[in-house]
Amino acid sequence: MPFTANRQFKAAPRLLGSAKGMYYTTVDGDRVLDGTAGLWCVNAGHGRAEIAEAVGRQVSTLDFAPTFQMGHPLAFEFAERLAAISPGGPEAKLDRIFFTNSGSEAVDTALKIALAYQRAIGQGSRTRLIGRERGYHGVGFGGLSVGGMVNNRRVFPTLNGTDHLRHTHDPARNSFCEGQPEHGAELADDLERLVQLHGAETIAAVIVEPVAGSTGVLLPPKGYLERLRAIASKHGIVLIFDEVISGFGRLGAPFATDYFGVVPDIVTTAKGVTNGVVPMGAVFASRAIHDAMMTGPENVIELFHGYTYSGHPLACAAGIATLDIYEKEGLLTRGAELAEGWRNVWLALKGSRHVADIRTIGLVVGVELASRPDAPGARGYEAFVECLKRGLLIRASGDILALSPPLIVETGQIEEMARIFSSVIDDLA
Ligand code: PLP
């Protein structure tokens, strides 16, 4: 099982049987309020009939079509629809789309696009990839190598020629802050340090999550992303935002790129792109990158890369139906309306037993518990198990607990989440 202690799980399995709206039902018939949109992906809520119908229709119309040297109209239609809402709006021109099947594949694709682009513009010496400590970019060898989670890296060899910015989390200066931390913009200068160390002519790309999700909801300090953008531009380094979590309305804007008003060169997405219903990822690249790669002989494949299931018809059908819902129900910006109430509910837990920090942005919260010195992570796991028993799904990453509900969540359900969560924290050993 992925990211699971298999034997521990099999001794006491937790099995979900069905889902509708904001709720899962376990195989034992218990209702569970979905505090995590599945795994940060079911942004329009569960069991959406429109998506089910679109996928069902597609299975009997065109179940699969190769996209190597071939195509099918739905993939182009979906790409056009995504281009129309692309990160940063029309001026950003981040509207050239490549389809993958997951976030990990989107990340590896983005890194490869950056490398291929650098070569296309005569900068083939730029092969170094820069990530950031406490970054999570999936589990491919590319994402793993630029990622900064020690447990993901320690067992596996990583790519040569990668390096990492320092992470931006500084609890001594920024704790229990409302929104972006005030301090830490200067940490972006770490990219300058790496340029000094390696030489700009060796660096192809830098990738960061605008808000680090899986490593504990770490918000960028005010001014940090702007500064990173400026340094990357100054040195000809491709800036990639990994928006696998923050894309599709999570922060109350369509993308984190829109929320922060900082435009990278490439954006990776997945999860919410199909409401989690069919696996898919989508990489948005700038027109400048795309166009620079279209200058060689016309019979030569410009990006030697792709997946059997790139642009899968069922994923495209699910994705188009998902965008219809997002647009009809205003879900890509609904988080902005709920954000203040969301923030207040969670910050009210300040001072609760074990709570060391609370970080919120959009419809995300990370509640950091003080770790048990003898067993780091044990308290987080206990809280996760106990919340589930009391009818709330949360996500534990060590001792940091994250909630990120479907964007259809109602205020009463937010209060219900906080009530269950708070009772569990109070009762923790
Ligand atoms: N990038 C980020 C920022 C993620 O949060 C994740 C997954 O949570 C991934 C990449 C990997 O996505 P996947 O699990 O679909 O491969």
Image (cartoon, helix red, strand yellow):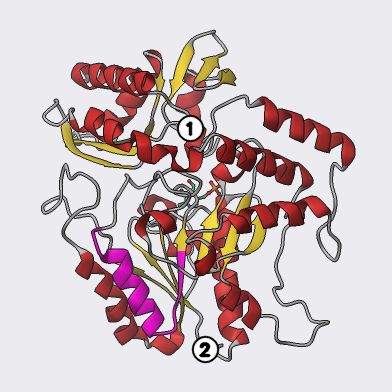
Q: Which residue is mark 2?
A: 125
Q: Is residue 262 above or below residue 173?
A: below
Based on the picture, tell me whether residue 149 belongs to the magenta stretch: no
Question: Residue at image x 59%, y 71%?
Answer: 112
Secondary element type, mark 2: loop
Secondary element type, mark 1: helix
Side (left or right) of 272 relative to 55: left
The response on whether ligand 1 sits within 8 Å of label 1 is no
Which three-letter amino acid code belongs to the residue tagged 1?
Answer: Ala
Question: Residue at image x 57%, y 78%?
Answer: 288
Q: Quadrant of residue 141?
A: bottom right
Question: Residue at image x 43%, y 52%?
Answer: 152
Report crowding for label 1: few under 14, some 14 to 19, many 20 or more residues within 10 A (C-alpha). Answer: many
Side (left or right) of 285 relative to 227: right
Q: Which residue is mark 1?
A: 37
Which three-letter amino acid code belongs to the residue tagged 2?
Answer: Ser
Report crowding for label 2: few under 14, some 14 to 19, many 20 or more residues within 10 A (C-alpha). Answer: some
Residue 50: in sight, yes or no?
Answer: yes
Cα separation, mark 2 vs mark 1, equals: 42 Å
Residue sticking out furthest to the top: 29
Q: Is residue 392 above or below residue 239?
A: above
Residue 226: x %, y % from top left:
32, 68
* Near-viewer residue (41 or 200): 41
State which quarter of the image contains the N terminus.
top right
Residue 220: x %, y % from top left:
29, 57
Q: Where are the magenta residues, as a range?
A: 221-240
Q: Is residue 35 above or below residue 315?
A: above
Residue 301: x %, y % from top left:
77, 77
* Near-viewer residue (145 or 82): 82
